């Protein structure tokens, strides 16, 4: 047996059989305790008049930097429902179909027939004491796939958020300027519907804390894909449709692409 082989063999024998110990996790948010954001949650979960219903693509659950858990823990029990799947409703989604049929349920999605969220009748004055606000949680392609494979979503009243602000979620790349994370979208929508700025301020504290921690430990601020493409600093090739949307299109082309516009806040990451 050669000396090199013997050395390699001894190295292999020295590898421990047991897997390395994992970092201790927070029982509440399931993140490592060193990067837990639970201390930034409200001392008492927020009680809102409206209810949030999240339709989440399965791939989103695997992401380590998700914002839906912040939303679920920041709101009082029963005010944030999360259903997972690629189409809705399914037999395993208990109670979802009834929620989708409820007259006070609205879907936040920028379809051609969607109206500005702020144009919805105000609570009580419009005949409703609350709204069930549906959000699609996933990337734009995933959210569009959910929408197109779920016919019942098409029959729901649809709304959109028109915003000129930028996302606080600076450690992830958003598709376009003005796109918000799921947490930010829900917080802003609730603030508009209930006319309570404290909702947005309170719900976004864990997100800001997460971003600050990541930036302090080597993460960098991300610009939107739209900004990177316009400044010619995006490192990947882009498709023809996205190129037309970002560089301007003819009226006919704009009409044909209207149902795919990514400029309004809707499906989120």
Image: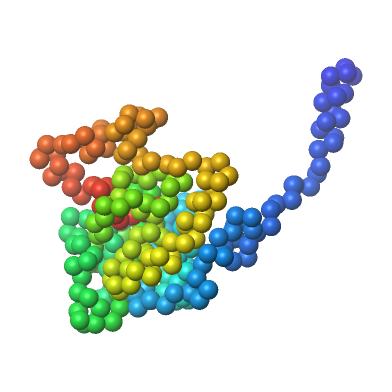
Residue lying at 28% horizontally and 64% vertically, measured from the top left: 107
- Quadrant (top left, top right, bottom left, bottom right) of the N terminus: top right
Question: Going by the image, does 40 lie left or right of 4?
Answer: left
Q: Nearer the viewer, residue 156 or 30?
A: 30
Residue 205 sits above or below residue 250 on the image? below
Residue 118 picture quarter: bottom left
Question: Going by the image, does 183 lie left or right of 147?
Answer: right
Here the colouring is rainbow
| Residue 58 can be seen in this image | no
Question: Going by the image, does 180 lie left or right of 216?
Answer: left
Residue lying at 15% horizontally and 36% vertically, measured from the top left: 249
List the single residue furthest toward the top: 2
| Residue 221 can be seen in this image | yes
Residue 184 picture quarter: bottom left
Q: How many marks?
A: 0
Residue lying at 56% horizontally and 64% vertically, measured from the top left: 38
Q: Percent from the top left, x then y, of residue 190? A: 33, 69
Question: Going by the image, does 80 lie left or right of 101?
Answer: right
Q: Nearer the viewer, residue 210 or 89?
A: 210
Q: Percent from the top left, x then y, of residue 144? A: 31, 51
Residue 118 sits above or below residue 182 on the image? below
Q: Which of 218 and 155 is in front in this view?
A: 218
Residue lying at 35% horizontally and 60% vertically, measured from the top left: 185
Q: Which of 235 and 211 is in front in this view?
A: 211
Q: Percent from the top left, x then y, of residue 183? A: 41, 60
């Amino acid at each position: 047996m050669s000396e090199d082989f013997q050395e390699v063999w001894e190295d292999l024998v020295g590898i421990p059989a047991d897997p390395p110990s994992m970092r201790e996790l927070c029982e509440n948010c399931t993140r490592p305790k060193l990067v837990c954001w639970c201390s930034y949650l409200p001392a008492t979960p927020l009680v809102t008049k409206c209810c949030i219903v999240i339709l989440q693509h399965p791939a989103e659950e695997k992401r380590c930097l998700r914002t839906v858990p912040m939303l679920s823990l920041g709101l009082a029990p029963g005010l944030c429902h999360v259903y997972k799947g690629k189409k809705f409703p399914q037999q395993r989604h208990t109670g979802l179909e009834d929620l989708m049929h409820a007259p006070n349920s609205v879907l936040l999605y920028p379809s051609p027939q969607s109206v500005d969220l702020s144009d919805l009748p105000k609570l009580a004055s419009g005949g409703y004491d609350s709204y069930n606000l549906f959000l699609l949680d996933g990337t734009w392609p995933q959210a569009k796939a959910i929408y197109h494979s779920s016919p019942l979503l098409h029959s729901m009243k649809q709304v959109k958020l028109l915003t000129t602000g930028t996302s606080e979620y600076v450690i992830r790349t958003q598709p376009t300027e003005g796109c918000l994370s799921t947490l930010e979208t829900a917080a802003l929508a609730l603030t508009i519907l209930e006319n309570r700025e404290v909702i947005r301020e309170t719900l976004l504290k864990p997100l800001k804390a997460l971003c600050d921690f990541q930036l302090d430990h080597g993460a960098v601020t991300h610009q939107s894909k739209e900004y990177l493409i316009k400044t010619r600093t995006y490192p990947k090739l882009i498709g023809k449709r996205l190129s037309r949307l970002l560089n301007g299109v003819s009226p006919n082309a704009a009409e044909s692409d209207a149902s795919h516009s990514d400029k309004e806040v809707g499906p989120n990451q």
